[in-house]
Image (cartoon, grey):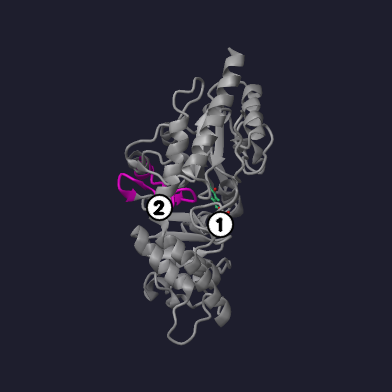
């Protein structure tokens, strides 16, 4: 009998009951705007910022409308201007080059390695070309952050971390997001916590964060924040900084606070799913598993493997066969962007460079989501299906 998987790769868990109750409280009192507070009340958005800053050990935190908005705001706050160039990963998702384009800048893409992290040799070669690196920890893979920060220091590069896939993760015991001047998180439905849409920004830099807060649309109400720099930090900045509204509201914040409290429990569940897939895919001829360094503590919410140097037809055959058995794999090697799998050469509003090492890796990457609605048994079944279809196509080729 051929096994089939019948679960949904896009179905997340429900919002926890305490999140639902907190949301109902906000709906009942009606003060959804973050600065609409009753006397003596701190709104949910301010409390969320205070709690997230404490959780990651950052001085300051700002809750905003999306992860993409967080990245734009971080770049503006560190001084990226129209016409500037910003270094970023060639292997990432569309909101990253999109954020660079939104501030009028141009991406310079850095190659990706077979471990799916930024190629640090290529970064060192290109570091002199820009003042800012928007580092995407794409799919939760964290590069050697010690070496990356050394390169940044040597070249005076300001680092902004895109932690959309590394909330709760760390490198050598330091939380992802605590290396750069800013780190940006997304709280939209497909990330580690779910408020539909939303983003978080952290920093230890008082001037940069004061600018970010004014940028986000705080008017002159920044003293109602609980994780903001002291009022003096705003003295000049409040006159010099435009208001580009992108605040988070109290309803989303209410939903997120209980989810953040559960993050480490959820991380362990995600990683159990990841390891169930990984264990099921060991020693499959032609299939390369990714090496995860000891210093990297990741929070999986997706799984990647490589079919290195396979022909496009063979990879597409694997994708089609797996799909016929209910397993949705996304391929980053397709010529046309489909769903979320767009590639650097499909972002044609920006210059498209030649990146041969990245092309070779993208040609072989297969990617799938692992929502927490899956069990480890589901993941073992998914792995059996992938194993048998990869093996069948591989054997037919050789
Ligand atoms: C989701 C995502 C973001 C930000 O996403 P929003 O949808 O704007 O919240 C940023 N970077 C990566 C790699 C992402 O996947």
Q: Residues within 10 Å of mark 1 (few under 14, many from 20)?
A: some
Give the residue at x 57% y 65%: 246
Q: Residue 295 at x, y = what percent? A: 32, 40
Q: Residues within 10 Å of mark 2 (few under 14, many from 20)?
A: many
Query: Could you tell me which secondary element the residue under label 2 belongs to?
Result: loop
Residue named by callout 1:
188
Residue 247 in which image quadrant: bottom right
Q: Is residue 39 left or right of residue 96?
A: left
Query: Could you tell me which secondary element the residue under label 1 belongs to?
Result: loop
Mark 1 Cβ inside 8 Å of ligand 1: yes
Which residue in the rendered view is the most extreme toward the front?
Answer: 1
Q: Residue 381 at x, y = what percent? A: 53, 35
**Disc marking residue 168:** 2
Q: Give yes or no for residue 171 being in the magenta stretch.
A: yes
Q: Residue 22 at x, y = what percent? A: 50, 73
Compare marks 2 and 1 and give the one earlier in the sequence: 2
Give the residue at x 56% y 25%: 388
Residue 392 in which image quadrant: top right
Which residues are the magenta region? Answer: 151-174
Q: Is residue 4 visible?
A: yes
Q: Is residue 30 visible?
A: no
Q: Is residue 259 above or below residue 397?
A: below
């Amino acid at each position: 009998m051929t096994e089939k998987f019948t679960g949904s790769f896009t179905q997340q868990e429900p919002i926890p009951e305490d999140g639902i109750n907190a949301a109902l409280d906000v709906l009942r009192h009606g003060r959804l705007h973050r600065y609409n507070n009753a006397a003596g009340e701190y709104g949910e958005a301010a409390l969320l910022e205070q709690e997230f800053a404490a959780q990651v050990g950052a001085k300051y935190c700002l809750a905003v409308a999306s992860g993409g908005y967080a990245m734009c705001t971080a770049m503006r706050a560190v001084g990226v201007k129209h016409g500037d160039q910003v270094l970023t990963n060639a292997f990432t998702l569309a909101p990253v080059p999109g954020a660079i384009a939104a501030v009028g800048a141009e991406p310079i893409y850095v190659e990706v390695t077979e471990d799916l992290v930024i190629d640090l040799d290529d970064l060192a070669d290109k570091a002199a070309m820009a003042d800012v690196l928007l580092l995407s920890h794409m799919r939760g893979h964290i590069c050697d952050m010690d070496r990356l920060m050394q390169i940044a220091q040597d070249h005076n590069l300001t680092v902004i971390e895109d932690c959309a896939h590394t909330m709760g993760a760390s490198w050598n015991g330091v939380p992802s997001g605590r290396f750069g001047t800013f780190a940006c998180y997304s709280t939209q439905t497909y990330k580690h916590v779910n408020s539909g849409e939303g983003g978080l920004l952290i920093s230890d830099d008082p001037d940069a964060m004061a600018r970010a807060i004014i940028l986000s649309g705080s008017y002159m109400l920044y003293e109602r924040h609980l994780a903001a720099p002291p009022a003096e930090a705003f003295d000049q900045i409040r006159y010099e900084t435009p208001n580009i509204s992108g605040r988070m509201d109290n309803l989303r914040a209410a939903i997120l606070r209980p989810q953040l409290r559960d993050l480490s429990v959820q991380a362990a569940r995600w990683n159990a799913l990841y390891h169930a897939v990984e264990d099921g895919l060991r020693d499959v001829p032609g299939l390369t598993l990714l090496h995860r360094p000891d210093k990297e503590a990741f929070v999986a919410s997706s799984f990647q493997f490589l079919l290195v140097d396979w022909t496009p037809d063979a990879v597409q055959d694997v994708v089609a066969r797996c799909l016929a058995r209910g397993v949705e794999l996304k391929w980053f090697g397709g010529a046309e962007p489909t769903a979320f799998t767009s590639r650097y050469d499909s972002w044609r509003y920006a210059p498209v460079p030649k990146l041969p090492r990245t092309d070779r890796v993208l040609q072989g990457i297969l990617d799938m989501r692992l929502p927490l609605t899956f069990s480890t048994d589901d993941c073992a079944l998914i792995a059996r299906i992938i194993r048998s279809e990869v093996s069948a196509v591989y054997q037919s080729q050789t």
